[in-house]
Image (cartoon, rainbow, N blue to C red):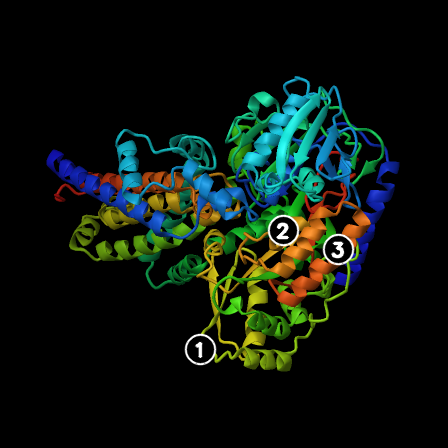
Amino acid sequence: MKRIALAVATTAVALMSVNGLAYAQTKGGIIDVATIGEPPTLDPMASTADLVGIVTQHMFETLYTFDAKWGATPLLAAALPEISADGLTVTIPLRTGIKFHDDSVMTSADVVASLERWIKIATRGKQAAEVITAIAATDEATVTITLSKPYAPLLALLSLNNAAAIIIPAANAAQDPLTSFIGTGPYKLQERVPDQYIQLVRFDGYQSLGGEIDGYGGARKQYLDEIRFVPVPDPNTRIGAAMAGEYDYVDQLPVESMQQITDGATEPVVLAPFGWPVFMMNTKEGLNSDIRIRKAIQAALAPEDMMLAAFGSEDFFSIDAAWYPDSFSWHSEVGTEAYKPLGDTEAAKALLAEAGYDGSKPLRILTSRQYEFHYKMALVAQAYLEAAGFKVQMDVVEWATLTTNRADPALWDIYITHSPFLPEPSLMGIMSDTSPGWWATDAKHAAVEAFNAESDPAKRAELFVEVQKVIYDEVPGFKVGNFNALAAQNPALDGVTPAPWPYFWNAYLTE
Amino acid sequence: MLRSALNRIFGMAIVMALVVTIVFVIVRVTPGDPAAVMLGPDATAADIASLRERLGLNASIPEQFISYVGGVLRGDFGQSIFLNMPVTDALWQRAEPTFFLTVFSLGIATLIALPVGVLSAYWRGSIFDQAATTLAMFAASIPSFWLGLIFMQFFAVKLGWFDTSGYGGPGASFGTRMHHLVLPAVTLGLISSALITRFTRASMLDVLNDDYVRTARSKGMSEWRVVVKHALKNALIPILTVVGLTAALLISGAIVTETVFGLPGVGSLIVSAVLRRDYPLIQGALLVVAGLYVLVNFIIDMLYLVVDPRVRY
């Protein structure tokens, strides 16, 4: 039954996105979107949280964004950047006549001030700041970024909607925290009552890029009068709300509620695949600073059982050794032989013996029940690790504690996290030397630097295979598999494309 | 009477000072960091450190304590880190749903509990008494989130009479907002009624056997007058205590129910403040809640004096 329901839902979604535009699109209407909570801030530069990106991408825009195939495409820029032959000068032409919500017109000065704010306060901006030597306005409609070395991820960093390089009026760029939420987006902030609603209304001065709709790129139509984001933090309440048809869109439902949603007043929306759960290894201190122990863990874990425990049915996950699923150009199976869906306890035992592990020191798994699937995976992992001869200590804490403790290398050996598939691999935490896990080896640096320096997309895909190989060789993390996400949608709401960060420009009500 | 009141007020001041200190210490020694929560999962350690600096979290704990207590004495509870507004404003914004939820649930609870408790005691051992006692035991054992979800499933999802959650959108009328309170108030009211019923029954049983009740009856007074005027009035002191404590519990403790029904009240504010480690807001909210507790206790103590003139503090 579930399988049929899933097939129906997926087909419905596919039809919606292909044929959706054949229906008459009417202007008007208000939609209510149930979110997982109140965003910690409405300044998308100041946070990497997905929820912040989901809400604020309607208000603020970046120079570039992602098309349906996760390639960068212009948004406030007039075209893709021109990159000099030595890769050090990036020239960005800007669209002209773009209006901010306060009716002022965007100029290159606003863009420079915004990008300077971004490299100063945004996590991803600071990442770029390491190679950016100057940001300057060449003329009214051109901005030039000068780099100290070629840096291919820049375009993806400028396109992302969290820790985002949004463009705001130069006059507001000094605000930290941001207090004037003036952007160029299709919707503007009308009212925010924390924990009650965030009300966005159509911005009449918006100039859509035009052309075909293409993922986050292309035309952005403003059919809806208003979009209201309502925090519904309790997942069971979100299920109830979806069944009752109270909201037009309900984000992030537990996958096990599929049947209830199918029987209710809204339609299930499945995004497959959505992302990966990952066990991060502390390569800096403790047991996992020994690569042989990490390899033993890699051999011991049985991802198929872990994913089954976490997601209940194969409808909601897939076993995939490649870090990116086959819908991405980064997908490759090369170098992933060490990933064994059912685990290899004997190999793990041999590796442990080789490492001289005597079972006196426990392997500490830091996890939280904020995301129940983390915890369920950890329980199965514990059984397999113990079978291989590990002594395992589970440190189950709540999420805020986990985010503090993971920053201290003395406190953990493995911590569990997850992420949607990020359009650009260099955005993955594992690629940075300073993110918890602190993976920094010569082999990594050689592979990552070659990947970051190359700008040709086809060559970059090949270079990512090398990065993936090093990850499997040195085991700084263990990608468990791919999992799907479930949301619910009012049958009368059309024009929504399933996306990791759902957006509602281009959406319209049919009744 | 005045002396009793002054004694009580002095005690209240000491309790509040202890609350300020204990809450401050507990909040600071709990692991977790508002800066890490605000910056999101991919923030670097350096980003977190610089935000901590800006938020004033890098000052030593005694320094932070002194500046906090100074603020509280001036009536300044500080600024919420996440909501970007003074803590008092944030609490005031959330007062309405919590206030009405408390009033409605307490109303429902006493309307059920008083008559049922009195009749149970009066007809002691009857089928009514047994049924009421069993039901009260049952209600007291139900977790509020579960009952809430069951009501939500039936009355909101199935019958569509109510909304599952929230407090109305922009510009929602007073009527709409109160409509959102019906299910949570019934949930809390039913659960709270259990305890009050049991106390009412026990307290009535005590007094129904007393000599003055027999005397009243022997004077030929009607049963109604005997039970309500004589017995119930004397049984009221323990009942008042439990009603007062229930009220205080509801003000602060609708936490689970408010979260399940997505009500933007004080309870859910405390939960989100704790999850985000919004230190000033946790401190301010707990201080206000503790203050209300103390105040409710004070009011009950004063009511004792009115109900029973023999009471002295």
Q: CA distance from mark 1 to mark 3?
A: 41 Å
Q: Marks 2 and 3, how far apart in space?
A: 43 Å
Sooner in the amino-acid sequence: mark 1 or mark 3: 1
The amino acid type, in three-letter code, at marker 3 is Leu
Q: In the rendering, which numbered label is found on residue A239?
A: 2
Q: Nearer the viewer, residue A8 or B190?
A: A8
Chain hosting mark 3: A
Q: Residue at x 29, y 35 (%)?
A: B67
Determine if marks 1 and 3 fall on one subunit.
yes
The amino acid on which the numbered mark 1 sits, given as a three-letter code, is Ser
- Kind of element beneath mark 2: helix
Mark in the foreground, 2 or 1: 1
Residue B14 location (% of width, % of height): 19, 42
1 vs 3, front mark: 3
Q: Residues within 10 Å of mark 3 (few under 14, many from 20)?
A: some
Q: Are marks 2 and 3 on the same chain?
A: yes
Q: Quadrant of residue A207?
A: top right
Q: Earlier in the sequence, mark 2 or mark 3?
A: 2
The residue beneath circle 1 is: A360
Q: Is residue A184 above or below residue A104?
A: below
Q: The numbered mark 1 sits on a residue in which chain? A: A
Camera-side residue: A333 or B158? A333
Nearer-the-camera pick, B295 or B103: B295
**Whole-percent x, y for residue A475 in the image:** 62, 65
What residue sits right under mark 3 in the picture? A463
Instruction: Estimate the spatial distance between the alpha carbons at disc 2 and disc 1, rounded to whole Å.
Output: 45 Å
Local packing at callout 1 (Cα closer than 10 Å; few below 14, some 14-19, many 20+) is few
- The kind of residue tagged 2 is Ile
In the rendered image, the quadrant that contains the N terminus of chain A is bottom right
